[in-house]
Image: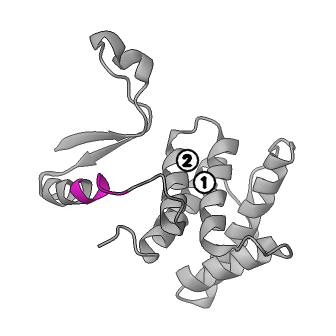
Amino acid sequence: SFNLTLGRLASSQVLGGRTAIHIGNLYVLEEQDIPKFQAFWKEFKQIDFTSATVPTMSLRRLNFSQERGLIEDKLVDLMIGFESLFLRSDEQHELSYRLAIRTAFLLGSAKESRKEIFDTMRAGYDLRSKVVHGEPLKKKPKVGTNELTFKEFLTRLEGYLRCQVRWHGWPPH
C-alpha cells in the first residue's frame, strides 16, 4: 500500500531542506488503486484552479475544508461549496430551503433519503448562518429527530458535497 496525505504542506517546515509536515487526512491507496490515482493526478495537474467556474469553486471549498482545524471554518467552506453549485447570486429569499430541496432532489433516491438530506442541508445552512453572523456553535447539530456529533454532521455534509462535485462532471474528461 501507499500512504498519501491530502492537504497543504506546512511550508515553513519545507524550507531549508527540512522534512515536510503534512496537514490533512491520511488516505491509504492499495496497490490496485495506484494506476487509477496516477491517471487522475495527471489530469488534475492540468486544471486551472484560478478560474471560478462552478465545479472548481465547489472543489476548492471541499479541499479547503480538509485543511481546517476549526469546525466552524470547515462548515463554512462546505456550505460555500454547496452554495456555489445550487444558489444563484440573484436569489435572495428562502436560500436554506432552495439549497436543501435542490440537494435532496439530486442526491436522494427515495423519499426517506431525500428527507434526511433535506434536513441535513437545512441544519447545515442554519449553522453556517450562525457562524458567519458571529454566534458560537453551542449545541450539537440536530437532523430531524437525531442529534449528531459535529464530526458525524461534517462527515455527512462532506460526503454529500463529494457526490455533488462528481455529479457536476468532476473530474473533467
Residue at 24 percent across and 39 percent down: it is 3
Is residue 149 visible to the viewer in this orientation of the structure?
A: no
Residue at 44 percent across and 53 percent down: it is 49
Closer to us: 15 or 107: 15
In the picture, residue 46 is in which quadrant?
Answer: bottom left
Label 1 sits on residue: 154
Amino acid type of the residue tagged 2 in the rendering: Ser
- How far is disc 2 from disc 1 in space, using C-alphas? 10 Å
Q: Position of residue 135 (x, y in %)?
A: 87, 44
Magenta span: 42-47
Magenta segment: does it hold 31? no
Disc ID at residue 65: 2
In the picture, residue 91 is in which quadrant?
Answer: bottom right
Instruction: Tell whether 149 sits left or right of 50.
Output: right
Assign the N terminus to one quadrant of the image.
top left
Q: Position of residue 144 (x, y in %)?
A: 75, 71
Q: Position of residue 52 (x, y in %)?
A: 54, 60
Instruction: Tell whether 121 sits left or right of 173.
Output: right
